[in-house]
Image (tube, rainbow, N blue to C red):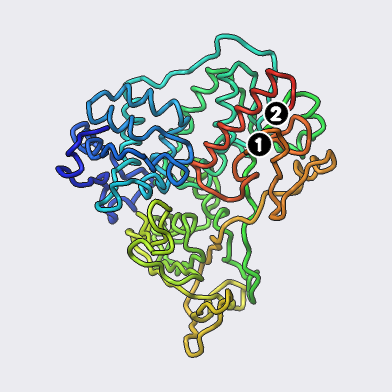
Amino acid sequence: MGKPTGFLEFKKEYLQKIEPKERVKNYKEFEKPFSEAVAKDQGARCMDCGIPFCHGDTGCPVDNLIPEFNDFVYRGRFKEAWENLSKTNNFPEFTGRLCPAPCESACTLGIIEPPVSIKSIERTIIDRAWEEGWVIPQTPTSKSGKKVAVVGSGPAGLAAGQQLARAGHTVTIFEKNDRIGGLLRYGIPDFKMEKRHIDRRMKQMEAEGVTFKTNVNVGVDITAKQLLADFDAVVLACGSEVPRDLPVEGRNHKGIHFAMEFLTKNNKHVAGDAIDIINAKDKHVIVIGGGDTGSDCVGTSNRHGAKSVTQIELFPEPPKERDKSTPWPLYPKMLRTSTSHEEGVSRKWAVSTMGFKANEKGEVTAIYGSEVKEENGKFIPVPGTEFEWPADLVFLAMGFVNPVKEGLLADLQKEGLELDGRGNVKAEFGTKAGSFATSVPKVYACGDVRRGQSLIVWAISEGRKCADQVHQFLTSDVEA
């Protein structure tokens, strides 16, 4: 795979980016795919390592055949690279922009050198495929006569729906929002992924026979009982949307918002909707939570023209290199700097928020707390490290705890649906290991609603695997 001496001859290259001071002026994507020549050199670095951990259990959850498409790229056979990639990944333009690339963390070359630029190569392949017109609808040769409802149009629902439609089933995807895409649409800022990528996949899927129904909140606008009566199988792919809250003094002051409220309104505004946004212009912004959602709040606040942006995290600062607790090929615990961080932010670690202060109008004016240290699994305030910082806007970006239970899940619980200890849908009732079948006959679950908050690549993987089990159930008339 690749050039036998490629990893010795070529250094790792990164996608070229527009400078931070320029890219914050708009919401456009600012990374460019590799040129063909650079892509070939980067594909050549794939070292024929014998055991490719990049697509093993520690690497790519969607099972991309990474050494194979690297080799095709190295040899300039881009169409074959695309055909190889499309066998395993329904939406490489999503993962090529948004995935944290556990495949690169597991790359064998990463033991001694920077790993192969797998994510960048993947994005280059799919962007080239769209440009060349290689991405076309894959319509089934025959129809099964079976109808499947998919609830939720995030990456898990889209992947499950596309696979089932291609297998010949009649698929309807229900989305409670006004546009398809779930958090891909309204949780991910356009500067990370422009929404045209979702729109053209929708057109492809419609040509393959998928029907999209927006503004339909299943469990409210249509009952679970009706859904079960109208469809031969139901796939729950409705995500994990209940955000983790911060129950401290002053939490209810004006100007303290969950991250998704901020990001969703801004994305709708960028899409052209006449909507009032939460504007960070000329404000001191505090982002609580050190993950990707918090980073998205940082990038969006900078584009608004915030006076200052501070991102705080309860845990201590990770090491700059791979921590010994996560040796290769595991996904490493280490400090990560996002493109939003590059645009301007003050990052604070091992900090606990004790409360918020407000003015006479009830508007937040400050955050206070202290530094902490971990002892016996608990975070203990460090005496003498108390602080108070100005805060005009505060965004809570501490992750999601479980799916929304009201509506659909509450309806299905009346039909016998079981939840696990974390409040996710329990889906392990099939005869196969790794089953996606719930305790309700002909109801399946995949993605975050089943596994909890996770990565886009895991959502696509689960959607595909769930679709396979639903297909077997529908074609055998025996529950998988």
Q: Is residue 291 left or right of residue 232?
A: left
Horizontal and vertical percent position of residue 298:
43, 59
Q: Is residue 365 left or right of residue 428?
A: left
Horizontal and vertical percent position of residue 397:
54, 60
Would you call the spot at circle 2 few (<14 residues within 10 Å), some (14-19), or many (20 or more)? Answer: many
* Secondary element at tag 1: loop
Q: Is residue 103 left or right of residue 217?
A: left
- Front in this rendered view, residue 441 or 415: 441
Name the residue furthest bottom.
384
**Residue under the point 48% across and 28% down:** 201
**Residue under the point 63% across and 50% down:** 241
Name the residue furthest front.
50
- Front in this rendered view, residue 383 or 389: 383
Q: Earlier in the sequence, mark 2 or mark 1?
A: 1
Does residue 215 appear in this view?
A: no
Does residue 47 appear in this view?
A: yes
Residue 141, located in which quarter of the rendered image? Answer: top right
Q: Is residue 295 left or right of residue 259?
A: left
Check contact, mark 2 vs mark 1: CB within 8 A.
yes
Which residue position holds label 1? 435
